[in-house]
Image (cartoon, rainbow, N blue to C red):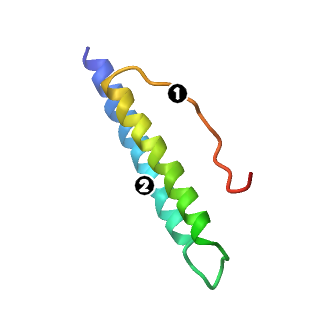
Amino acid sequence: MRDKRQKFIDLAESRVTRTIKDIHLIGNLSNKSAYSYSEDDIRKIFRALQKEIDTAKFRFGGDADSRGEVFKLKG
């Protein structure tokens, strides 16, 4: 049982740290002098992120449909 707990801790710390860094990089896209984007683009980005967070939270409480969708702004 202890091995499963330690594996969970190791993976959770690694994955959450990586995700936080990636979210920080997404925030860097807000630099208007380097990038051009619309309010609709921003809504799509944060809607997709929130949807995945909600799905992950739900999976800890029961069954969930793991879609593994690829995020696209166009289309």
Report helix, strand or loop for mark 1: loop
Classify mark 1: residues with Cα within 10 Å, few (<14), some (14-19) or many (20+): few
Disc 1 residue type (three-letter): Ser
| Residue 36 at x, y percent in the picture | 67, 76
Circle 2 is placed at which residue position? 20
Q: In the figure, 48 relative to 34: above or below? A: above
N-terminal label among 1 and 2: 2
Mark 1 or 2, which is nearer the eye? 1
As drawn, is 14 to the left or to the right of 43?
Answer: left
- Where residue 7 sits, quadrant-wise, is top left
The Cα atoms of the two marked residues, 1 and 2, are separated by: 21 Å
Disc 2 residue type (three-letter): Ile
Circle 1 is placed at which residue position? 66
| Residue 37 at x, y percent in the picture | 64, 73
Residue 39: mark in rendering: none
Q: In the figure, 43 relative to 6: above or below? A: below
